[in-house]
Amino acid sequence: MLTIFLQAQPQGSSSMMLIMMGVMFVGFYFLMIRPQMRKQKQEKSFQETLKVGTRVVLTSGLHGRIAQVQDDGFVIETLSGKLKFEKAAVSREFTEARFGDKAKAAADKTAEKKEIDTEKK
């Protein structure tokens, strides 16, 4: 019985199997894990660069303007009032796509004005 099992497995197949497993792991890393890590890093940097006055679209489809930036989230001003959302809920920036450079300049002025008001207090 033992001789049947020894004859069924050729000599070099175990090393070939380890090489194939290694190639599969490297392939999964470059095709799945690495792009996901890059996407998470871009998303985090996007959320950190948002400032007051920026128009955003949330993952739920809600459109609004950032009224306050807090440690754990944003206060979004919508037509129905002010609502607090987590930073992860912001899907994309809508300011430049719809309103162009004019809205970006207005957002910068608003941020500068709030900084000056804060310094005066």
Image (cartoon, helix red, strand yellow):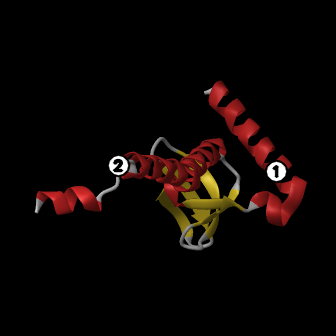
Residue at 16% x, 58% y: name it: 3
Across and down, in percent, residue 17 comes to 40, 52
Q: Is residue 43 above or below residue 60?
A: above
Q: Is residue 109 above or below residue 89?
A: above
Q: Quadrant of the N terminus?
A: bottom left
Across and down, in percent, residue 102 comes to 89, 55
Residue at 62% x, 42% y: name it: 45
Pick whichever of labels 1 and 2 is earlier in the sequence: 2
* Quarter residue 82 falls in: bottom right
Q: Amino acid at mark 2?
A: Gln
Q: Secondary structure at mark 1?
A: helix
The residue that mark 1 highlights is: 104
Callout in the foreground (1, 2): 2
Q: Residues within 10 Å of mark 1 (few under 14, many from 20)?
A: some
Q: Is 77 in front, or is 45?
A: 45
Residue at 48% x, 58% y: name it: 84
Q: Amino acid at mark 1?
A: Lys
- Dot label at residue 11: 2
Across and down, in percent, residue 104 comes to 82, 50
